[in-house]
Amino acid sequence: MTQGLQPNVIALRAEGRLLPSAFGFMPTRETRLTDPRMARAEPQNRSADDLRRSSQMAAAQAGDRAAYETLLRDCVPLIRIFAARQGVPADHLDDVVQDVLLTIHRARQTYDPARSFTAWLRIIAERRAIDLLRRFGRQRAREIHSPLAFESYADETVDPALNSDDAGHSNRVKKALTTLPERQREAVQVLVFDERSLAEAAVATRRTKGALKVNLHRALKALRVKFAGKD
Amino acid sequence: MTLTPDDRLIRGLAADLKPVRRLPSPLLRAFGWLAMVAALAIGLASFADLDAVWQRIIAAPDMWLAVIGSTLTAVLAVIAAFELSLPDGSRGWALLPAPALLLWIAASGFGCLRGWIVPQSGVAALGEARDCLIFIVALSVPLSALLLLMLRRAFPLYPGMTAAIGGLAVAAAAATLLNFFHPYDAAATDLAVHVGAVAIVVAANRALGGRVFGTLIYAPIHVTEGEVAAN
């Protein structure tokens, strides 16, 4: 399965790479899902999409990471639709998505592939959406949203003199940085100035997380030694 | 090359994926717990004077109706608890033990109105009634622990309700087992003590179990890849 960052699910679907046939190594589940007796047990008509998600979840229960990742990505737009229908405001949809993804992960042993995955997901998404609306409601009852009052409030801790001093400090730090070896400087740049996570920085610099940590550590140590005499 | 929070979470969850064993059906798991209770009943029965117990129970209709009521309440409540423990379990299951509970309460209450005393029994004094309370509560501790452990394997999204219905099952089972060592007639003190004991067990289960499930649902998750820390 592709490891692309934002795989175009629709394109993959068109290529037939997300069809249940990809999991042909599990004949028993395949036969169960198409078994007419099962169809009777599950009266609603299950769409091809739903059957595919079911078999992906079954594969995930068996430990298939690629199927699981595809399934979760496929779930995100559905969760957004289900949550929006419950009245979750657009700026909170991401919270519901994350809650539901975590719930799917922790409750994955409770899913029965003979039943509709989409229905299972819908119920979980609706419940998590209601949970969030309740939390949100409580928060709104206690806190006041007033951005203007916040912005026009004078911050007494700010001291202009301090600011210029800060600028002097940062200039000195920048100058000191230029004396560092290139790899150490790069580590400080991505991890400290760009505020990236270790994993992101590792991707950006094509180095391992361990190497980045060591470089950052050495850089900070060198800087500390440099400034120890001056400050 | 920036990852959205959803992408990072999905990658982290996929990296964290381990194969899971699918949970057996709720009915099967409920019968597993009932089998343990039955084993306990057989153990306790070996210490009891079964003839006297039998004579006392069949002496008046409200006596055996109360036993049937408490047994049925235990069976139906534990089935309801296991159904509720599924993330997509319907809240309607909570009503399943209601008819049996009504029968139990009605038969016990009717016993108080009966004008004569059942042979081989007396009306419990307060001290003896306290023994009943201790018996029900003490027997409920291991039964509750077992049930909460079993329920915990699922993922209840109604944690409080699931734990309370489980508590009802435990209290009803303990009250049923109490009949082996209960040479008293159904008097008002006795009924009050039983209601009190059941209420204590249900409330304790709700408080404790709700917390156990709550930590399960809202526990922070730490996923190594992508350094995701959510919830």
Image (cartoon, coloured by chain):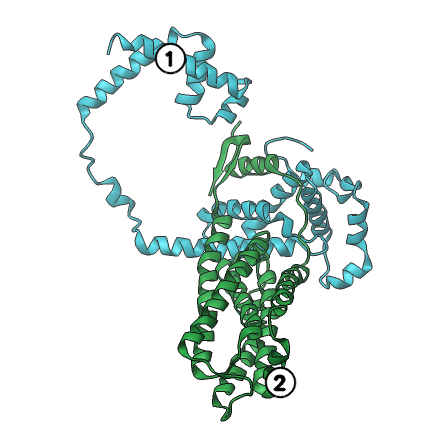
Front residue (pair B193, A14)? B193
Residue holding disc 2: B58
Front residue (pair A134, A88)? A134
Disc 1 residue type (three-letter): Lys
Q: Distance of mark 2 from mark 1, alpha carbons?
A: 86 Å
Q: Residue at x 29, y 12 (%)?
A: A172
Label 2 element class: helix
Residue A128 visible here: yes
Disc 2 residue type (three-letter): Ile
- Residue B165 drawn at (x, y percent): 53, 65
Examine the image and state in which quarter residue A178 appears.
top left
| Count of numbered tags | 2
- The chain carrying label 2 is B
Front residue (pair A144, B141)? B141
Chain that the image shows in green: B
Chain that the image shows in cyan: A
Examine the image and state in which quarter residue B12 appears.
top right
- How packed mark 1 is, by other alpha carbons closer than 10 Å (few <14, some 14-19, many 20 or more), is few
- How packed mark 2 is, by other alpha carbons closer than 10 Å (few <14, some 14-19, many 20 or more), is few
Residue B202 visible here: no
Residue holding disc 1: A221
Q: Residue at x 49, y 93 (%)?
A: B115
